[in-house]
Structures are given as C-alpha cells and as structure tokens.
Image (cartoon, rainbow, N blue to C red):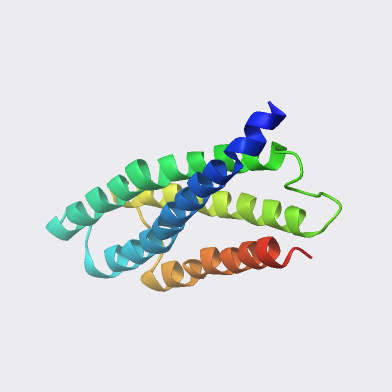
Amino acid sequence: MTDFLALAYPWIKAIHIMAVITWMAGLFYLPRLFVYHAEQAEPGDSRDQVFTVMEYKLYRFIMNPSVIVVWVFGLILVITPGIVDWTFVWPWLKAISVIGMTWFHRWLGKHRKAFAAGVNTLSGRNYRMMNEVPTLLMIVIVVSVVVKF
C-alpha cells in the first residue's frame, strides 16, 4: 500500500488541488449570490426562483462533490508516508482551517435552504461579511502548506 501511495502521490495531489479550486470557487460565489438574492428578490417572485435554482445547483452539483473529493484525497495525502510531519504547527493549523471551511460550507447549505423556504433572515451586508471567511481561511491554509512552519 505504501508503494502505491508513493507512486500515486502526484496524481492524488493533482486531484486534491483541482477539487480545492472548485470548492473554493463555490465558497466564494455562493455568498455573493446570497447578497444579490437578499437585496434584489422577494420570496416567490421570478428573481427569487432564479436565485434559488442557481444556489441549489451550485451547492448540490459543484460544491458538495468537491468537498467530498477534497476530504477523501486530502486524507489520502495525510496517510501517505513522508508527506505530513505532525511535529510541526502547519498541519494542525491547516486541519483546523479545513474544518472551519467545512463548517462554513455547511453554514451556506443551511442558508441556501432558508432562501428556498422563503425564510431568510440575514441581510446582504451579513452575507458580504461572511464572504470574507473563506478568504481568511484560504490564506491560513496556503501559507501553512507553503511555508511549513
């Protein structure tokens, strides 16, 4: 198994990176859709219906599969011998940040359902502020992985 992981490492890493890019695109775009949805649509109107479909498809068909691939291939990277040295701070910081990003993903899913049910209670300003969460977590993750302190 160790030999297989070592040989497959570049492919595993490439798939992981592609899934991260796709997931991050959704994490950046869905809150922006929520801003427009909160500010430009009323429950039940035609714009509400369009936003609801866009948000559903983005979350269900792009973000959910991406987060699964990120976690599966990320965990495979973690168990690949010689890749992660847990005596450093960076893998712990990355792990905490990825868990935070996953929490944010779930938070977006909860609010997508609120919009679909016509019971959203947050403003466009709230969603603008929350849109900074993935940016901050991404910075922590990238610096941790590249600098490896």
Give the percent coordinates (x, y) of residue 116.
Answer: 29, 47
Q: Position of residue 113 (x, y in %)?
A: 36, 46
Q: Nearer the viewer, residue 125 or 65?
A: 65
Q: Residue at x 13, y 56 (%)?
A: 46
Q: Residue at x 42, y 63 (%)?
A: 28
On-image quarter of the C terminus:
bottom right
What residue is shown at x 17% (from left), y 60% (from top)? 47
Give the residue drawn at x 63%, y 61%.
141
Visible in this render: residue 17? yes
Residue at the left extreme of this rendering: 46
Residue 148 as seen in the image, left or right of residue 129: right
**Figure disc tally:** 0
- Which quadrant of the view contains residue 3? top right
Choose between 86 and 122: the one closer to the eye.
Answer: 86
Residue 71 appearing in the image? no
Up the image or down, 100 lies above or below 113; here it is: below
Q: Residue 102: x percent and y percent?
A: 56, 49
Q: Viewed as shown, does residue 54 lie left or right of 83?
A: left
Looking at this view, name the residue that lies furthest to the right: 87
Instruction: Name the quadrant of the N terminus.
Output: top right
Residue 121's x, y, as percent?
40, 59
The residue most toward the top is 1
The image quadrant of residue 21 is bottom left
- Tell which of 84 and 68 is nearer to you: 84
Would you place residue 108 above or below residue 41 in this image? above
